[in-house]
Amino acid sequence: MTSEGVSNCCGEAEEKEDDNEDMAMGCYDDDDDDDFSALTEGNPEWGSEDGVLGFNEGLSGEVKPRVLLMGLRRSGKSSIQKVVFHKMSPNETLFLESTNKICREDVSSSSFVSFQIWDFPGQIDFFDPTFDYEMIFRGTGALIFVIDSQDDYVEALSRLHLTVTRAYKVNPDIHFEVFIHKVDGLSDDHKIEKQGDIRKRAGDDLADARLERIHLSFYLTSIYDHSIFEAFSKVVQKLIPQLPTLENLLNIFISNSGIEKAFLFDVVSKIYIATDSSPVDMQTYELCCDMIDVVIDISCIYGLAEEDPAVGSPYDKDSMAIIRLNNTTVVYLKEVTKFLAMVCFLREESFERKGLIDYNFHCFRKAIQEVFDVRVEVQKNRKLLSQRRRSKQATANGVAGNPH
């Protein structure tokens, strides 16, 4: 990569720092704990489940949008959460008990993947008059509605319409995502037929209510393959204000390195938070996930220090892997940050210039760090603003309570 290419790679990230800061500062409401306290006040059945992060724990001023998991009972909401974020085996989810309380969990795998998941029990009517649903949707980044494709989905579509229309009135900026779940038992033709039917019915319901401006995204998902990880990747990407900058950096990197495809993965969840502008192939994504699993598994066995295995992490700054496929394709993985990895696909003849690729990768990693620094600065500013606001409120309350 020439010096001009290096300056372009890092310079374009700097140009977008101000835009990223403005986007991050204005995207979400950060009063989550206050909302949940008011939400559950006088309603003990809406409390947290044992073993889940306490609802009133502070967020240290960090901006964390909410992702709501909704749907009817036994549609597979809790199984999705356990498989994607807790590495539970799909077969083990058969023994999960039905959720009967709202479960909130913080997901903070990396600086770019940081949000809260609220898992709502299907049997509870959160539109009950005694329940302030506006507090649910205020500050929500994405609403995932799960529909069981192997069950009659007439009732699910009715609940979807009710949920979406009310949520849109409170917060028009919510991303509405529909997971057509449990499609592993369906043929390919049946999957497409189900998706088309659900999409048409949901669209007709919105058209009848004159709400065509509401956009629904549909995904065919199953916990028994990588489709659920890819679907969650698409959802999480919409919550990342820095996504255009990340995609632009990846495009610059691959164009100067002879690489055909590149992904930026969150190693813990196997969610890809960004990729270049070329189309994503499902088989390519599955190969990336398998490669990450192999790297982590082998590193856990051989990568820890012999003197004290408890010290350090199996995935660190020296983590790297190369896999040569029998079709002259090379898959190259390198550590970007503590929780992020880049996985690249390129031809063997291009990989002969590995020195150039590694140098370009060094420039890319430096640019990524600059994006991280912007986000950290934004979080500090949000924390200071929140503290000042609370201080002013406390002062005002003190004056009101002690009139002269």
Image (cartoon, helix red, strand yellow):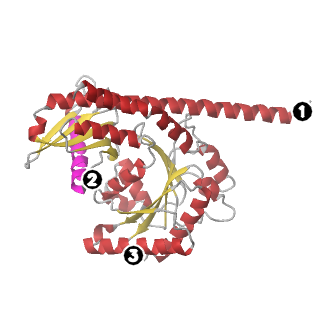
Query: In the rendered structure, which segment of residues is drawn in magenta?
Result: 282-300
Specify few, some or many for label 1: CA neighbours under 10 Å numbering under 14, 14-19, or 20 or more.
Answer: few
Q: Which residue is mark 1?
A: 403
Q: Is residue 391 depicted above or below 173 in this figure?
A: above
Q: Which residue is mark 3?
A: 197
Count of numbered labels shown in the rendering: 3
The quarter holding residue 78 reads: bottom left
Q: Give the residue type at disc 1.
A: Pro
Q: Residue at label 2?
A: 280
Q: Main secondary structure of the magenta part?
A: helix
Q: Position of residue 338 (x, y in %)?
A: 34, 32
User: First in sequence: mark 2 or mark 3?
Assistant: 3
For residue 93, say whether it is visible.
yes
Tell me if 245 is positioned left or right of 71 in this view: left
Comparing 69 with 103, the one in front is 69
Q: Is residue 215 above or below residue 60?
A: below
Q: Is residue 294 magenta?
A: yes
Give the residue drawn at x 20%, y 45%: 260
> Which residue ends up furthest to the top in the rendered image?
307
Based on the picture, tell me whether residue 289 belongs to the magenta stretch: yes
